[in-house]
Amino acid sequence: MNVSPAQFLVMMLIAVASSLAIFRHADRNGRTHATAWGIGAFLAAGVVVPTYIVSVWLRKRRPAAPL
């Protein structure tokens, strides 16, 4: 499969944007290992991004711990 330079640039921009979005969301919401989530989203977006979305969804559904 031959990838043109323009196609490669578009793929890299998508990967960088998704990893920055995941990192920023994780960092702002106090998730542990926000950097690892961002790096993982860049390297293996097909696995990490859906996993992150599901973990955020499950965390929101969990009742808050009593103080």
Image (cartoon, rainbow, N blue to C red):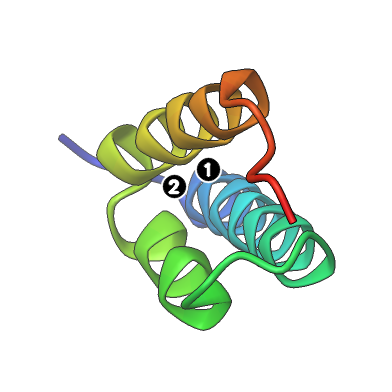
The residue that disc 1 covers is 7
Q: Nearer the viewer, residue 56 or 38?
A: 56
Query: Which is closer to the viewer, label 1 or label 2?
Result: 1
> In the figure, residue 20 lies in which quadrant?
bottom right
Q: Where's residue 52, x and y in %?
A: 46, 41
Q: Nearer the viewer, residue 66 or 26?
A: 66
Report crowding for label 2: few under 14, some 14 to 19, many 20 or more residues within 10 A (C-alpha).
Answer: few
What is the secondary structure assignment of the residue under circle 2? loop
The residue that disc 2 covers is 4
> In the figure, residue 40 lies in which quadrant?
bottom left
Image quadrant for the N terminus? Answer: top left
Report crowding for label 1: few under 14, some 14 to 19, many 20 or more residues within 10 A (C-alpha).
Answer: few
Residue type highlighted by circle 2: Ser
Image quadrant for the C terminus? Answer: bottom right
What is the secondary structure assignment of the residue under circle 1? helix
Residue type highlighted by circle 1: Gln
Task: Name above or below for residue 55 compared with residue 8.
Answer: above
